[in-house]
Image (cartoon, rainbow, N blue to C red):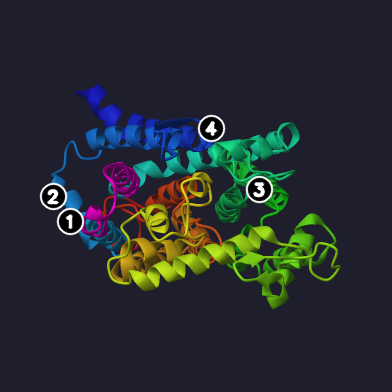
Amino acid sequence: MRGMQLSGSVRIPVITAAVLAGGLVAGSLVRINPFSESGAALTALDISIGTGLLLLFGSVLHRRKLGDFVRFVGRHPAWRFSALFLLIALFTLLVRAGSYPPNELIVAGAYLLRLIATFVLFWLLAYGGTRFRKPLLGAFGVAAAALVSLGFLQLQLVPNFRFARREGWDPHLDRLFSTFLDPNFFGIFAVLAMAVALAMYLRNRKEKGRKGAVAAGYLLLFLASWVALYFTFSRSAWVAGLIAIPPIAWKYRKMLTVVIAAVFIAALFLPTRLGDRFESTQGLIRASDYQGERYVCDPAEPVAACDPSGSNRIFSIRDGLELARQHPVFGVGYNAYAFAMKQDGKATERSLRRHSANGSDSSLLNVLVTTGAFGLLAFLAFFAGTLWRLFKQSAGTGTVAWLSWGLLWFTPAWLAASFFNNAVLYQLILVPWGMLLAVALARGNPASPTKNPARGGR
């Protein structure tokens, strides 16, 4: 009995955190493709989520009734709207089930099952209470440091990613993408790492001994992630960093906020590759660069370099808006965007094999297209409830308060970036964010609606 108690109270949180961190670091490198024709794949992170669920069901719920867990999810101002969104997503897919062949319906259902499993994991971590705080924070720090280090290694060893085009990935040249295999998404993850690292450093900056060393490690992670963010040369991720990082420093010192913001803004005007990419966006608003259904730009023009990447996003968002107008109430079914595009004649089987062709390059538009107006409202309500709870949790000077403060500013920046990249629904960003959110909103934390007086939140 004593061994079981030790396993439930100590080992399970540590093992679960390690499993999730391992899946996060493996990223897109480990992929099993059970649906070879569709391109859908089971990733290392999927395997980690499944393993984590098995561990948590056996430890978190072994002494409590399942009904208590359900009531916890239903009472929480953030989690209940996430549950509502999942129910709506399931409903829309069932409503549209007759519109797609069985193999396409299976693929869409598999992605929905992945999303449901991901959110159940978040709920269980939050329900498990404050004992998951240190393991999850430590695992995130280790995983972020490993991913940034692997990113610098990749930039040296695999700078040219054009060979992966045949596998469905977008080609990248001399850009840092680590194991994510996508510089834009990894840039957003780097902003998340910066937000958490800066918040945790400011929380522990005055500590001595081991805690002081941990604070120094967070400062190093913050600086390394900032350099990694730059070398992704991702415009949307850089803007997300500008939105998220300076306000986090405001809680500590106003001048630090000014300095950080100045560095972010200065990089936009320096004659570097990042600055050149921002300058090339001028071509996106010139009517002369568009001829019918094509984007045409003269690279010899000194005032407006070509921006095919940005133009592809514009065409993608335009097609998504048209689909949304055609299916405003129930959408086309969760993750059935690509299939609906094919039915509507806007995409071919060949084009859908491209990694970026299965969505509108906008998370909120993807949600609207696939789950309809009600799904979008539930999705927005989830984030509104999350931000409100994080704001309430951010009062004070404890670990939970500083973590909540970091997530409070990262989350809207993440949403803003998702207008140009499908970043919110990207699993390798959603999962670490959800793990940290579960820490901030765990049972027993101060200001928690399910606070346990026997446990502290410092």
Asked where in the image residue 81 lies, by quadrant, the reply is bottom left
Q: Quadrant of the N terminus?
A: top left
Amino acid type, callout 2: Gly
* Image x and y of residue 342, in percent: 41, 54
Which residues lie in the magenta part? 92-121
Residue behind mark 4:
29
Marks 1/2 in contact by CB < 8 Å: the verdict is yes
Measuring from the top left, give residue 42's x and y in whole percent. 40, 35
Mark 4 is surrounded, within 10 Å at the Cα level, by few (under 14), some (14 to 19) or many (20 or more) other residues, namely some
Q: Position of residue 374 (x, y in %)?
A: 29, 70
Q: Are marks 4 and 1 in contact (CB under 8 Å)?
A: no
Q: Are marks 3 and 1 in contact (CB under 8 Å)?
A: no
Are circles 2 and 4 on residues that touch, CB within 8 Å? no
Examine the rendered structure and indicate whether residue 53 appears above or below residue 112: above
Q: Label 1: which residue?
A: 71
* Amino acid at pointer 4: Leu
Q: Which residue is mark 2?
A: 67
